[in-house]
Image: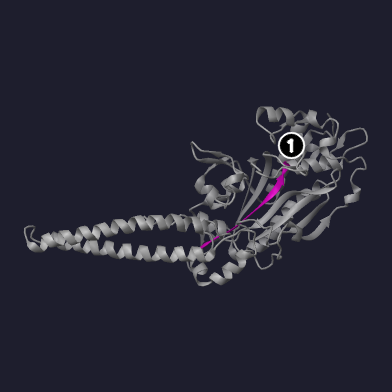
Amino acid sequence: MYKFHGTMLDLKFLRKNSDFVKTGVAKKKFKVDIDAFLNIDGERRKAIFEYEQLRAKQKQASDKMAQMDKSSTEFSSSIGALKQLSARIKELELRVSELNFAWNEAYLAIPNIPHASVPIGKSDKDNVELMISGDMDSVSPCAVPHYDIPWFSQAIDFSRGAKVSGAGFPFYIGSMSRLVRALVAFFLDEARSNDYTEFSTPILVNEVSATATGQLPDKESQMYHDAQDNLYCIPTAEVPVTNFFRGEILSEDDLPIYRCAYTPCFRREAGSWGKDVRGLNRLHQFDKVELVKWCHPDRSFEELEKLRADAEGILKKLELPYRVLLICTGDIGFAHAKQYDLEVWAGGQKRWLEVSSCSNFTDFQARRGDIKFKKKSDGKTQHVHTLNGSGLAIPRVLAAILENNLQSDGKVKLPEILIPYMGGVAYLEC
């Protein structure tokens, strides 16, 4: 009746260290009343305790009555007392059900606590630039915003995409479509070379899966939802891949586990339209390769650095200038404990474009998804740590390639690494 529907922070830790949790949560952009949750938690525990006590009393009374003479005065009076007890139990059952709902809603709304190494800040303006790789001035002198390349609309047709689906759903045509496919193949090959096992995944997930990874309830307004079957179009392969092990106990010897997957991704991006989202900068449907890890808690931050290095290695081979940002507490995601963003330099727009977020969720997702491992030392189970990162997202990488490598004759010189994937084609032209 009071089934445990999912967790985030360790409940015992939260109850004993509420001030620490309140301080950590307050650093993030999410408004959560920890005291209100603890009040509900206290009421719920009290109601459950009384319910269980009365249920035990009811069973004892029923067992005792079974031994009585059915015609006796004692039996008759016991029936009346048992009816009163049953009525109170029904009241408590309803109360516990109401408290369970409120408790679960409040608990799922509490974000993960940022790691101590995450810089304090209020917005993306407080993110810390850790490094820049490559020379921003080395891009083509002919660089223009990709959407201003004369043949752009012939290669990526937004108007017909809008006719068929709506804004943000473009058609890729001819050699541009082939380049997208080449990028996906290259990204997957790079992931496999770094020991990630490739997955092909569902692109629709149920509510439990989206809740386990933290998309629900935090990002419900950003997800496309099929109400009839209560399924969600995935915003990233992180959701189905992470849920692969939901409800399972892994072997400690198997950790860390690396997986990668290519999927189309779907995001409503509600309220995000503006002057900086033209062309490929922000789409409702886009292609991405995702990197996912399940790790031992003692080594998850070391694995985060490796994950970041894997994503950076792709950008280096594409010869794209990029920078690494350490995301501050005011900009970090709901489920994230620590997050790096990788941004490429788009020489035509003269701005940075995010192409990857590499994040450690510690045991936040694993608790919600009940993903554990059995320790060799004592045979006890413990929640794993989950990590993921884009390796990489196609549209903005494509935008940077088009802008940075535009030649005076209107052709785009492709990075050397992609030429074999393009069947020897070295230049892209309409």
Q: Taking the image as drawn, is residue 140 in sight?
A: yes
Q: Which residue is mark 1?
A: 180
Q: Which quadrant is the N terminus positioned in?
A: bottom left
Q: Which quadrant is the C terminus positioned in?
A: top right
Which residue ends up furthest to the left in the rendered image?
A: 71
Residue 342 % position (x, y): 75, 53
Quadrant in the picture for residue 168: top right
- Find numbered disc 1 in the image and state the secondary structure of the residue it sits on: helix
Is residue 196 covered in magenta?
A: no
Q: Is residue 336 left or right of residue 9?
A: right
Residue 114 versus residue 269 in the image, above or below: below
What residue is drawn where x is 67% and y is 44%?
A: 271
Segment colored magenta: 381-394
Q: Residues within 10 Å of mark 1 (few under 14, many from 20)?
A: some
Residue 380 % position (x, y): 47, 65
Residue 214 % position (x, y): 57, 53
Quadrant in the picture for residue 145: top right
Residue 36 versus residue 176 in the image, above or below: below
Q: Main secondary structure of the magenta part?
A: strand
Q: Amino acid at mark 1?
A: Val
Is residue 385 covered in magenta?
A: yes
